[in-house]
Image (spheres, rainbow, N blue to C red):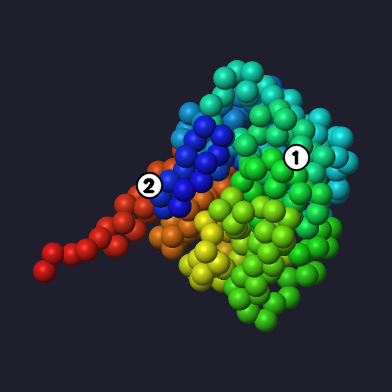
Amino acid sequence: MKMQIGARLFDGPGPFLMGIVNATPDSFSDGGRFLDPAAAIAHALRLADEGADIVDVGGESTRPGAPAVAADEETGRVVPVIAGLRARGFRLPISVDTTKAEVARAALDAGADLVNDVAGLADAALARLVARAGVPVVLMHTRGTPADMASRAVYGDVVRDVARELQDALARAEAAGVPRERVILDPGLGFAKTAEQGVELLARVAELRALGRPLLVGPSRKSFIGKITGAAVEDRVPGTLAAVTACVLAGVEWVRVHDVAAARQAALVAAAIRDAAAAPRAR
C-alpha cells in the first residue's frame, strides 16, 4: 500500500495508528474532556508523542442515540483544533471526522489532509469536494443515523453484506471522481452492528481484503468489549488491545484508537508475529 497524505507517505502493510481527538461534549468514551480547543490540541500533541501516525479530529459524536450537530457548530469545534495544531508546527497528517461537505471544506482549508466519513460518502456534495480536493478518504460502513442505526443491524451474513455495501460506497466515490487509490475502507464496528456482529467482523475481517483497498478498523473501547467482559468504557483498554492484535494479524493496515501508546506496542508485536508467519522457512 502506498498513500500520500500531506507530507507523509504511508508505504507497506502497517500497522498505522490513527489517534482519536473528540472535540465534542458527548462522546461515549471521553465526553467533554477535549471540547475546549486548547485541551484538544494538547491531547493531539500527546497522541503524536505516543506514536500516532495520524490524528483524527471530530466535532460530532456518532455514538448510538447521539443528536445531530449543525454544520456551523461542528465547524466551530474542529477548525480551531486543526488550525491551532498547524500554527504550532504540527507535522503529522490530520484527518477530519465528518459527514458534511461544509465542515470538511473548512477543515481542509485549516490544514486537514484526509476526510474520515462514517457515512461512506452518502452526501454527494462531500463526494464532489473530496474529488476536487484530491485528498484521501475513509469510507465507513453504517446504516441509518446514530438515532436509528441500532434497529438496522439486520443482516443475512454480516461480513458479506458489509462487503457489498462497502463496494457500493466505493462505487459512489469513483462515480464522483475519487480514484480508488485514495480510498481506505472501514467496516464500522459498533455502527448498525450488534456486539456479536462486531465479533464476527473481527473474526473474518480478512475477507474484506477482497475489496482491494486498505482497511481501517476502530475497535477502541467499543461496546462489544463491554458486553464480552463486563468492563466499563474506561476499563476497556485490554480488550481493545486484543482486538487490535487480531486486526493486525489479519492484515488490517490502520487501527483507530484512543490509547495510542498501548495500542502501538500491541500492534508492533502483532506485526512482528504476522511477518514471521509469512516469512519463508529454511528446509
- Above or below residue 195? Residue 83 is above
Q: Position of residue 89 (x, y in %)?
A: 57, 19
Q: Which residue shows up at 67% across the image and 59% down it?
A: 174
Residue 86 sits in which quadrant? top right
* 13, 243: nearer the viewer: 13
- Residue occupied by mark 2: 268
- Above or below residue 208? Residue 181 is above
Residue 56 sits in which quadrant? top right
In the image, farthest residue toward the left: 283
* 33, 133: nearer the viewer: 133
Residue 150 sits in which quadrant? bottom right
Q: Which image quadrant: the C terminus?
A: bottom left
In the image, farthest residue toward the bottom: 156
Helix or strand or loop: what does disc 2 sit on? helix
Q: Residues within 10 Å of mark 2 (few under 14, many from 20)?
A: some
The amino acid at mark 1 is: Ala
Q: Position of residue 74 (x, y in %)?
A: 81, 37
Sequence-first tag of 1 and 2: 1
Q: Position of residue 179 (x, y in %)?
A: 62, 54
Question: Pointers 1 and 2 in contact (CB under 8 A)?
Answer: no
Marks 1/2: CA distance?
32 Å
As drawn, the label of residue 10 is none
Relative side of 18 to 24, left or right: left
The amino acid at mark 2 is: Leu
Q: Which residue shows up at 72% across the image and 30% down it?
A: 109
Q: Which residue shows up at 56% across the image and 34% down it?
A: 6
- Residue occupied by mark 1: 104
Relative side of 1 to 208, left or right: left
